[in-house]
Amino acid sequence: MPVLNRIAAYAEEMKGWRRHLHANPELSFDCFTTAAYIVDRLKEIGVDEIHPGIAKTGIVAIINGQGDGPTIGLRADMDALPIQEITGAEYASTIPGKMHACGHDGHVTMLLGAAKYLAETRRFKGRVALIFQPAEEDGAGGREMVNQGMMDRFTVEQVYGIHNAPNVPFGHFLTTPGALMASVDTAYVYLTGKGGHGATPHDCVDPIVALVGMISAIQTIIPRNIYALDEAVLSVTMVNSGTASNIIPEEAMFATTIRCFKPEVRALLKKRFHEIVEGHAAAYGVQARIDYDWGYPATINHADQAAFAVEVAAEIVGDTAVDGNSVREMGSEDFSYMLEARKGAYLFMGTGPGAGLHHAAYDFNDEAAPIGASFFARLVERAQPLA
């Protein structure tokens, strides 16, 4: 794989970084030891500025190039997931119930590898802002870093990120202009009726009957209210009620995940969801409370920046290993907030066969780290070249 030769020489060091991070996972915004480890590596690398404590444990580090120029942002998320690891690896998680099951340890490693190269060579103008972000999985750390003024404070003009993709051919890059990943909203519906004996339903107001009616009805939103070519998903993922076979319960609840790509579709999904739940509640005589969590927006690549990223990726891995018009997907990503704030692009990078993301047997492929680091480094050199 034609990675940058200097970065290829870091491969064993990068593997050590990644495996240390893998063994010491932290969740959400509480990435304190992770952030401290990253800061120590950045000091060894010799970056010019280190700014910790953004969005609690986030870090922005600056590398100055040669001469005046803009600032380009490169982002890596660094939080883990609440999963008990089953890989059996010698560097497996040492924290019960927590593991890097999404490869954020690999993302951090790729960005550190790029940082080491860029700090050594400095074959670019302007500055690089290395963005190490907490709480991608839970908490919208990307939004918090943007809301705390990161883009303006460090004069970031464009921003890029990579996510590893297991079971995509090793070293292949995938992206597309426009929407790449979906928005995600979560709705919790809590129903209250009147409980009683299962033998006397006429004396009760049964929330289970209402729940079943609502779940059936909301499944009609996408085929009957959403244009067929506007992709959307509404999945009921939780149903809870009852304590015994002969008792009609007082309460019932269900939860859904709701995903799409267009803001107007997102608004319509929310409107119809409320109308159906509230209408069925009235029809069945139950009280309904809806907690509708407006989550991450769609991850929307800027066309020019996506095309540029495809060119850079092709330079690293070859034209045949890059798909610049890939199929978009219904997963979500809080890099979306950074792309709302600045122009940029997000890409997937294949890591070959293995357990999927968020699986207890997942492990990042260390062989992929120099490829991602080379992409980041070459992106900077191409975006802000020396005269």
Image (cartoon, rainbow, N blue to C red):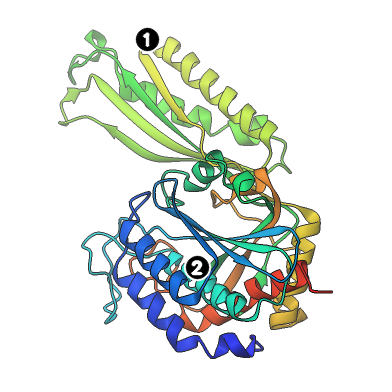
Report how far apart the C-alphas of labels 1 and 2 lie in the structure: 51 Å
At 22% across and 8% down in the image, what residue appears? 203
Identity of the amino acid at label 2?
His
Which label was assigned to residue 285?
A: 1
Residue 133 visible in the displayed image: no
The residue beneath circle 2 is 107
> How many numbered marks does the figure carry?
2
| Front position among marks 1 and 2 | 2
Q: Height in image: 293 above or below 361? A: above
Q: Is residue 136 left or right of residue 241?
A: right
Q: Height in image: 199 above or below 167? A: above
Q: Position of residue 162 (x, y in %)?
A: 59, 65
Q: Quadrant of the N terminus?
A: bottom right
Which label was assigned to residue 251?
A: none
Q: Residue furthest right?
A: 387
At 39% across and 19% down in the image, what residue appears? 289
Mark 2 element type: helix
Q: Earlier in the sequence, mark 1 or mark 2?
A: 2
